Amino acid sequence: MTMSEVRMLALSPMLMLLLSLLMASFFDTTAGQIGVCFGQMGNNLPKPPEVVAMFKKYSIPRMRMYDVNPEALNALRGSNIEFILDIPNHKVEGIANSQTVANAWVQDNVKMYKDVRFKYISVGNEVKPEYAAGKAMVLIQAMQNIDKALSEADLSNIKVSTTTYLGAFTDTYPPSRGRFKDEYRNFLQQVIGFLVNKRSPLLVNIYTYFGYIQDKKNIPLEFALLKPNKGFNDPKNQLHYQNLFDANLDSVYAALEKSGGGSLEVVVSESGWPTQGEDPEASLPNAEAYVNNLRLSVQNGSPKRRGKPIETYIFAMFDENDKPGAETERHFGLFNYTTRELKYGVRFN
Ligand SMILES: *[C@@H]1O[C@H](CO)[C@@H](O)[C@H](O)[C@H]1NC(C)=O
């Protein structure tokens, strides 16, 4: 063997590695693409088949919906759109109390639509300690019943999870201090065990907007909008944080590590920025900056999981005029429901 042949041999494992990394990114091109939540709390929204057509037109690869809607499910048949379906909180207890009810739910709403690409069933959305009070087992029991129903229907490729939110966590600054609030850990601890066992992700709604609004004194707007800024170092692990989204997500990961969920993946099941409302920062330019910066940022993962794209869903498809609460709540939409046009420039692929 000549010296150059030896060098070639030494190089080839490197080349193989490079090739396999290239292949992996080739086959996983949608992982870093953003999905969109199709909320329906509005009295003036386009009908679900038209909305599904808009997802296709704009190449939005993923959709989340908050309850069963047969019209939407029928329109999704045969499409490539990956789909998260929620079981709303008010249905969770009935499913927890009866395997028959769980089986029927899966039969009627999932099994019936074999050509829809269900990815996760989210049992509950932002379930609160008040809901779980005195019935801490309700959530986990409902998840177990749905999981059993799916597996008996030969649908165990569909993962069961639940959606929580940043309000379930505390000590989120710096991110390494993150932990569950005690009252949430009480009923989420078993859920974490279930997810670890099933290798299902935890779904978490993360809004830097609300973090910013609640603490404008300490949080620069640029940090919340993922714009250039100086960021900060987490002294405990020396990771550098350039934006509030990464910091929030890594505080969730830190909390999971402290609760036996260090192996879990987090799917960001909602994030977004309002275009109008009572706060001056709720504006079209800020929403446009946020969504586009987020879309690029999630492709690289957060500092704790660098290089691993974050599966992320933008809230929401449209403004929803029936949503209660602050004015901003009704202005998170990406699209104008009258014109069906984007309210601001966003690319989805
Ligand atoms: C949607 O478009 C219509 C027609 O151009 C306009 O009057 C309306 O203000 C827009 N709504 C939003 C929320 O942008």
Image: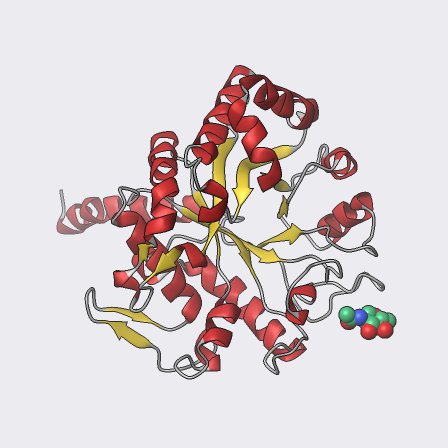
216 shown above or below 209? below
From the viewer's perspective, tell me whether residue 180 is left or right of residue 293.
left
Residue 26, how many percent across, how many down?
48, 47
Would residue 349 be visible to someone looking at this image? no
Give the image location of residue 228, x and y in percent: 44, 80
**79 versus 150 height, above or below:** below
Displayed quadrant of residue 334 = bottom right
Q: Is residue 85 above or below residue 130?
A: above
Query: Residue sitting at 47 percent across and 74 percent down?
Result: 214
Residue in the foreground of this view, choosing between 268 and 142: 142
Give the quarter the ligand 1 occupies.
bottom right
Q: Which of 10 and 65 is in front in this view?
A: 65
Q: Which colour scheme is used?
A: secondary structure
Which residue shows up at 20% across the image and 71% down it?
Answer: 235
In the rendered view of the protein, which quadrant contains the N terminus?
top left
- Residue 89 appears at what percent x and percent y? 58, 41
Return the residue nearer the eye: 316 or 102. Answer: 102
Q: Furthest residue to the front?
A: 134
Classify the position of the C terminus by image quarter. Answer: bottom right
Residue drawn at x 37%, y 66% is 247
Can see residue 236? Answer: yes
Query: How many numbered badges does the structure rendering display?
Result: 0
Q: In this view, does 210 lie to the left or right of 232?
A: right
129 lies left or right of 104: left
Q: In which quarter of the image is residue 181?
A: bottom left
- Where is residue 68? Give x, y as percent: 69, 36
